[in-house]
Amino acid sequence: MLKILLASQNPGKLREMQFILKDLPIQIIAPAEIGIHIQVEETGKTYAENAALKAKAFAKASGLISLGDDSGLEVDALDGKPGLYSARYAPSPNATDADRRAFLLKNLRPHPRPWKARFRATIAIAHPSGEIFFTEGICEGEIIPEERGTGGFGYDPIFYLPDKGRTMAELAEEEKNSLSHRAKALEKAKDFLLKL
């Protein structure tokens, strides 16, 4: 079974990716499992650049094929913000997911609803040789002013899917992992992963 290193310490992402790719003969492993503890500074100007920075750094450090991703929430009323800075979108450097959601809602208050938004994810798969492959996935929805649901992480409790009538955090894990931005990007990567 091919081992692929996840270029992230995020346990939520690890669970999500393992679930989405469970039908492939590959094993997604966490950096801690092989004693790798590196922090990659996200200095890229695009999701693809950040995903590549992470995937290449982990591939180089481990000698394994590594999968990096970068994703963000883009809100039309805020001209696409928080976007690339979604994980760092709050005045405090020690902000929690709840702090970021509260800050986003505060910034949206002056704008009329609906607050159209999308999650965008770019996946980069880096081979230790330097070869790199990219895919992208998008999930359209809108931001709602009250939190709903206990699943997921990040902005999921305020990201509403009109065609489902629920937020991302109200979906069962299996359902979320069939329609999320990351799921769509990983779905596009399956053929490439099978070739590996």
Image (spheres, helix red, strand yellow):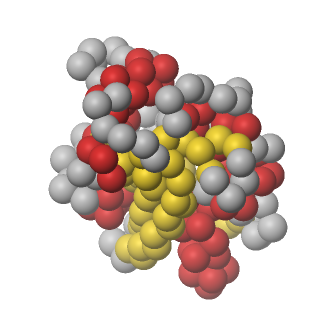
Q: Position of residue 89 (x, y in %)?
A: 30, 31
Q: Quadrant of residue 106?
A: top left
Is residue 74 visible to us here? yes
Q: Nearer the viewer, residue 62 or 50?
A: 50
Q: Residue at x 63, y 53 (%)?
A: 162
Splitting the image into 4 quarters, where does residue 194 fall?
A: bottom right
Name the quadrant of the C terminus: bottom right
Number of callouts in the render?
A: 0
Towards the viewer: 149 or 129: 149
Q: Residue at x 46, y 73 (%)?
A: 135
Is residue 186 depicted above or below 45 in this figure? below
Q: Nearer the viewer, residue 2 or 95?
A: 95
| Residue 193 visible within the image | no
The percent coordinates of residue 61 (x first, y second) are: 38, 50
Placement of 164 over or under 48, stated as above or below = above
Q: Quadrant of the N terminus?
A: bottom right
The residue at 67%/48% (across/down) is 16
46 displayed left or right of 1: left
Is 14 left, or right, of 36 in this rendering? right
Tell me residue 126's x, y (percent).
42, 67
Left or right of 13 in this view: 38: left
Residue 113 located left or right of residue 171? left
Q: Residue at x 77, y 54 (%)?
A: 175
Name the spot of residue 161 as percent of width and height, x first.
62, 51
The image quadrant that residue 178 belongs to is: bottom right
